[in-house]
Amino acid sequence: MKSNESGADRATRVVVGIIALIVAFVVLDAMDGAILGIIVAVVGGIMVLTGAVGFCPAYRLVGLSTCKKECCGNSCGCSKE
């Protein structure tokens, strides 16, 4: 799996994913079986996971990449080609 997310994209995903997880469990009662809470928790978990690994399957499906081709491989999290 080649990285298709820039460093900023990855950081944003992790932060927004953590916020979504907090909202899902604290505000929307995901642990009590609230459907909206469960949906928000799943989306938040996916965001944290994709941000952590640097690969987004949805980006791959539509041919998107926020990772710069000329990247050094360190500053944005891209892998060298």
Image (tube, rainbow, N blue to C red):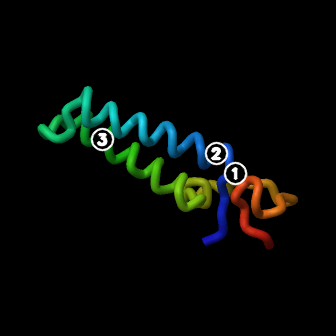
Q: Which residue is drawn at 58% across and 40% down?
A: 12
Tell me the residue that label 3 is attached to: 39
- Sequence-wise first label, 1 or 3: 1
What's the residue type where badge 2 is placed? Asp
Q: Say whether residue 55 is left or right of residue 65.
A: left
* Residue under numbered circle 2: 9
Which residue lies most toward the top here? 27
Q: In the image, residue 15 lies at what x, y percent?
A: 51, 39
State whether residue 8 is above or below residue 54.
Answer: above
Residue type of the residue flagged with mark 1: Ser
Task: Give the quadrant of residue 32.
Answer: top left
User: For mark 2, does the 10 Å Cα neighbourhood hold few (<14), some (14 to 19), or many (20 or more) residues?
Assistant: some
Indicate whether 71 appears above or below 12.
below
Q: Looking at this view, is 69 or 25 the one in front?
A: 25
Q: In which quarter of the image is the N terminus?
A: bottom right
Q: Quadrant of the C terminus?
A: bottom right
Instruction: Measure how far apart labels 2 and 1 are at the Cα level.
Output: 5 Å
Mark 3 or 2, which is nearer the eye?
2
Secondary structure under badge 2? Answer: helix
Q: What secondary structure is marked by label 1? A: loop
Circle 1 is placed at which residue position?
6
Q: Mark 1: give few (<14), some (14-19) or many (20+) Cα within 10 Å.
A: many
Q: Is mark 3 on a helix, strand or loop?
A: helix
- Residue type at mark 3 is Ile
